[in-house]
Image: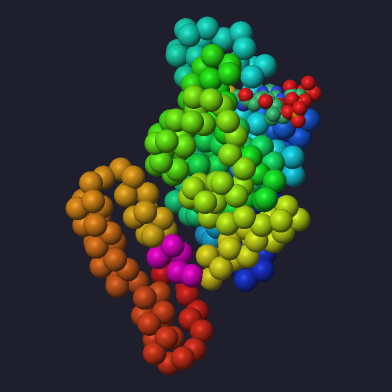
Amino acid sequence: MAYVNIEVRTEAGKVGIVQLNRPKQLNALNNELMDELGAALKAFDADAAIGCMIVTGSEKAFAAGADIGAMASYSFADVYKGDYITRNWETIRSIRKPVIAAVSGFALGGGCELAMMCDFIIAADNAKFGQPEIKLGIIPGAGGTQRLPRAVGKSKAMDMALTARMMDAAEAERSGLVSRVVAPDKLMDEALAAALTICEFSQIAVMAAKESINRSFESSLSDGVMFERRMFHATFATTDQKEGMDAFVNKRKAQFRHQ
Ligand code: HXC
C-alpha cells in the first residue's frame, strides 16, 4: 500500500497498526489514502486474532486535513455526483473492534474528524486539534460539526469551527476530546499498552461495550439503556462470562477464549 504502513504487533494479543504515510504533505487525506485505510481496518476487523487497532500518523502530523490541492478545482457537481471526499470516509464506522487514534502533531479538518471517528484518542502533548475549514470557504464535511460538539460541547465547537482556532493537547484533554495525554516519545507505547489491555478481555464483551457506547449517540436515553441491558443480558450466554466470573471468585487470572 502506498499511502499507509501496516504493522501487526504480537505480544499478549495482536494489535493491528495503520500509520498514515504521506509525511511530506502532513498526511493530507485523499481518496486513495482513505481507501487503503478502510481496507486495512476491514482486514484487521475480519482477522480473528486481532483484538484492537491503532491509527496513527507522524510526529508532526496525525493528518492536516483533506488534501486541499486535490479538492481545489472541484465543482459542486463533481463532489455531489461522485460523493467525492466523503464516499470512503466512513468505512471506519463499520469497524466493530476498537480503534484507538494515537495523535501527535496536527489533527486538523478531516484529520480531526478522522481521529473523532476512532473510539478514543490518545494524544501526544504536541497535538493540535482544529476545524479550520472556514478559512478555505468551506465547512467540515466528515462529521466535525456533529462529533466535535458532542465531544467538547457547543461553545468550544463553535469557537473552533467559526474562528479556526486550534486546541492544544491540554485543552483537548480538559474538554473531553482526548482520553489521555503523554510525551510524544511515549505515544505509541501508551496506545499499544491500552490496545494490549483491551486484547486481554473478552472480544465479545469489548465489541458489545463499543456498540453500546456508540448507541448512546444515536438514541434516546431510555432506548440506549434498553439496548445496553439486552447486550448485558446477552453476555451471560458467553463462556467468557463464566470464565471471567469464575476467575474472580477463585482469585485467578481469567483466560478469555472470545466465545
Ligand atoms: C494538502 C497540505 C495540507 C492539506 C499541509 N499540506 N496541509 N497539502 N492538503 N490539508 C502541505 C503543504 O502544502 C506543504 O506542502 C506541506 O504539507 C507542509 O505544510 P506547511 O504548511 O509548509 O507546514 P507548516 O508551516 O508547519 O504548517 C502546518 C499547517 C498548515 C498549520 C498544518 O500546513 C495548514 O494550515 N494546513 C492546512 C490545514 C487545513 O486547512 N486543513 C483542513 C483542510 S479541509 P509543500 O509542497 O508546500 O511543502 C478538510 C475538509 C475535510 O479537511 C472534509 C472531509 C470530507
Q: Nearer the viewer, residue 36 or 24?
A: 24
| Segment tinted magenta in the rendering | 201-206
The residue sitting at 30% across, 71% down in the picture is 237
Q: Position of residue 51 (x, y in %)?
A: 54, 61
The residue lying furthest to the right in this view is 24
Horizontal side, residue 197 vs residue 146: left or right: right
Q: Quarter-wise, where is residue 20 in the image? A: top right
Point out the image quarter for the N terminus: top right
Task: Please report the residue visible at 69 percent of the width from the left and 61 percent of the height from the top.
Answer: 189
Q: Quadrant of ligand 1?
A: top right
Vertical placement of 60 versus 80: above or below? below
The answer to whether residue 77 is above or below residue 258 is above
Q: Is residue 67 above or below residue 204?
A: above
Main SS class of the magenta portion in the image: helix
Image quadrant where residue 32 sits? top right
Would residue 39 be seen by someone viewing this image from the given angle? no
Question: What is the count of numbered marks?
Answer: 0
Residue 12 appears in view: yes
Residue 120 x/y as whole percent:
51, 51
**The stretch drawn in magenta includes residue 9:** no
Name the colouring of the figure: rainbow
Please tell me which residue is depicted at 73% across the width and 52% down the height of the picture.
184
Locate the C terminus by quadrant: bottom left
Q: Which residue: 49% across, 48% down? A: 175
